[in-house]
């Protein structure tokens, strides 16, 4: 297996994340020099915008920065891609690439996590004592909104029922696209009060 990258705009990343699919570039539509497929590279963003952009777009500078607002990193078997026969670092995945079939994450160019498929919730504190059933691995769901006191809740929550208005665990995440890495989580004491648990961890699983 190898880690492959797909660089793109934030708007494009959101559409792919919600659909769960990377659709192939098609030669009939233009930008598919090496045939139909999803175009990937093994060039790490740590190499910098200039080097990644030069590799991916062959010196075309128009809107390069926008195209590198974010990136998917996907762990794929090497046999799933075809190496382009040229000097640039380009690999092509034939057909639609289904994210659910692989380990992946979506990050902003600066490395901040925007989304991934699984998160693990754990605690050795009071949250686990009161809500042990809520510990474990979760599949991230981005398109369920719960109605809380007549307002759409913009927070991340976890519990036994996806649309429960009083979940076991809650993060006031300020509309972050995935559970925030530094904002603490709270556990429910009763139907109307919450308490912090400094031992409560919600971490991405790759």
Image: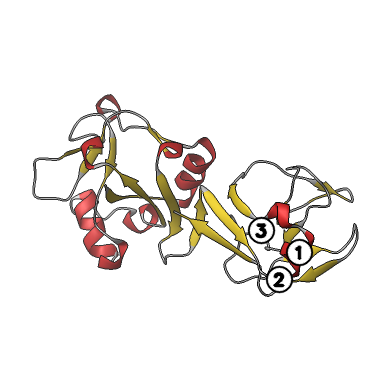
Dot placed on the residue nearer the N-terminal end, 3 or 1? 1
Q: Quadrant of residue 119?
A: bottom right
Query: Which residue in the structure is indicated by mark 1?
Result: 129
**Mark 1: secondary structure:** helix
Residue lying at 76% horizontally and 64% vertically, measured from the top left: 129
Neighbourhood count class around disc 2 (C-alpha, 10 Å): few under 14, some 14–19, many 20 upward: few
Residue 116 horizontal side relative to residue 48, left or right: right
- Kindly identify which residue carries mark 3: 175
Crowd band around label 1 with a 10 angstrom C-alpha radius: few (<14), some (14–19), many (20+): few
Instruction: Provide the residue designation for mark 2.
Output: 125
Relative to residue 161, is residue 50 drawn left or right? left
Cα distance, mark 3 to mark 2? 26 Å
The residue positioned 30% from the left and 67% from the top of the image is 46
Tell me residue 83's x, y (percent).
15, 41
Secondary structure under the numbered disc 3 in the rendered image: loop
Rendered location of residue 195, percent (x, y): 80, 70
179 on left or right of 195: left
Quarter holding residue 174: bottom right
Q: Secondary structure at mark 2?
A: loop
Mark 3 vs mark 1: in front: 1
Is mark 3 in CB contact (under 8 Å) with mark 1?
no
Q: Residue 8: percent from the left, percent from the top? A: 38, 49
Marks 3 and 2, the one that precedes in the sequence: 2
Q: Residue at x 34, y 53 (%)?
A: 63
Q: Which residue is drawn at the image coordinates 17% and 34% (left, top)?
A: 34
Whether residues under marks 2 and 1 lie with C-beta atoms below 8 angstroms apart, the answer is yes
């Amino acid at each position: 297996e190898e880690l492959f990258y797909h660089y793109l705009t934030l708007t494009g990343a959101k559409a792919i994340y919600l659909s769960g699919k990377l659709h192939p570039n098609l030669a009939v539509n233009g930008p598919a020099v090496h045939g139909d497929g999803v175009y990937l590279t093994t060039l790490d963003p740590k190499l910098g915008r200039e080097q990644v952009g030069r590799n991916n777009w062959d010196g075309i500078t128009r809107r390069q920065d926008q195209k590198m607002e974010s990136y998917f990193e996907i762990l794929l078997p090497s046999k799933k891609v075809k190496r382009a026969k040229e000097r640039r670092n380009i690999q092509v995945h034939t057909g639609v690439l289904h994210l659910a079939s692989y380990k992946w994450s979506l990050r902003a160019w600066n490395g901040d996590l925007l989304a991934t498929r699984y998160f693990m919730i754990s605690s050795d504190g009071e949250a686990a004592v009161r809500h042990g059933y809520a510990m474990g691995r979760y599949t991230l769901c981005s398109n369920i909104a719960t109605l809380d006191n007549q307002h759409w809740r913009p927070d991340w929550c976890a519990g036994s029922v996806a649309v429960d208005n009083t979940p076991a665990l809650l993060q006031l995440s300020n509309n972050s696209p995935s559970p925030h890495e530094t904002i603490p989580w709270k556990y429910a004491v009763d139907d109307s009060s919450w308490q912090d648990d400094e031992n409560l961890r919600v971490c991405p699983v790759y």
